[in-house]
Image (cartoon, rainbow, N blue to C red):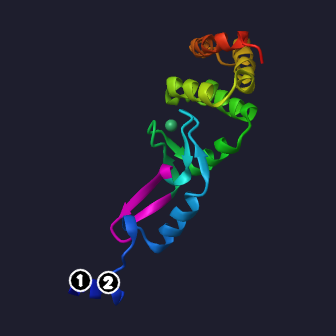
Amino acid sequence: MSRGQTAFETGKYKVTPLNLTDEDLKVMRLWKTVKAQCPWCFYTSDLWSFATFNYRKKKGKTVNMQKCECPDCGAGVMRRTLLKIYNMSMQEYGRWFWDSVFTGGSYDKVQWEQLKSRLRSGFSYSECEPFWQEYWLHKEMSLSGWNADADEDDDAYEDFAAQFEPEEDEPR
Ligand SMILES: [Zn+2]
């Protein structure tokens, strides 16, 4: 045993993996058991994968309990939003998503390619329908003068519908 190891054993230094405090280790264990989902690219993983850290002189590195970041698209997303999205039904997600796009100014955050491909690979056409029904509801509201700037989203819908077309012909 080296002298260094002796120092660790006497508790002089705290040895924790990833440089985390005891408290944050508890957070890590908990967050690894919870699923989270990015609303903009639909990346799904355990919450810990989305963790970000604060670095302060006094406290050092600590987990940021509010703000997370998607490891796939890099979007900053609040922790409660990541958890909420994962637990939503497709209709609830559609309503939340199109609200954000049409009235929340979130169009630029959306990773359309990833989102569409993850919807396609994870869900059937009929499972995705509520998502696009919400799109049309929002679209109608926007056409009635509510918000006239959302025309771009038509392309996203047409792309999406086109990708599903072959499946529609298959018998279920
Ligand atoms: Zn993302």
Principal SS element in the magenta part? strand
Vertical order, 53 against 98 (above or below) = below
Amino acid bearing label 2: Phe
Q: Specify the quadrant of the image occupied by residue 123.
A: top right
The verdict on label 2 being within 8 Å of ligand 1 is no
Label 1 environment density (alpha carbons within 10 Å; few <14, some 14–19, many ≥20): few
Res. 60 in view:
no
Across and down, in percent, residue 154 comes to 61, 12
Where, quadrant-wise, is the C terminus in this rendering?
top right
Q: Residue at x 63, y 14 (%)?
A: 148
Do the numbered discs 1 and 2 sit on residues whose CB atoms are within 8 Å? yes
Q: Residue at x 49, y 49 (%)?
A: 50
Q: Secondary structure at mark 2?
A: helix
Amino acid bearing label 1: Gly
Q: Which residue is mark 1?
A: 4
| Foreground residue among 56 and 77 | 77
Q: Tell me the tag on residue 122.
A: none
Bounds of the magenta segment: 49-64
Label 2 environment density (alpha carbons within 10 Å; few <14, some 14–19, many ≥20): few
Q: Residue at x 55, y 46 (%)?
A: 45
Vertical order, 134 against 164 (above or below) = below
Q: Which residue is mark 2?
A: 8
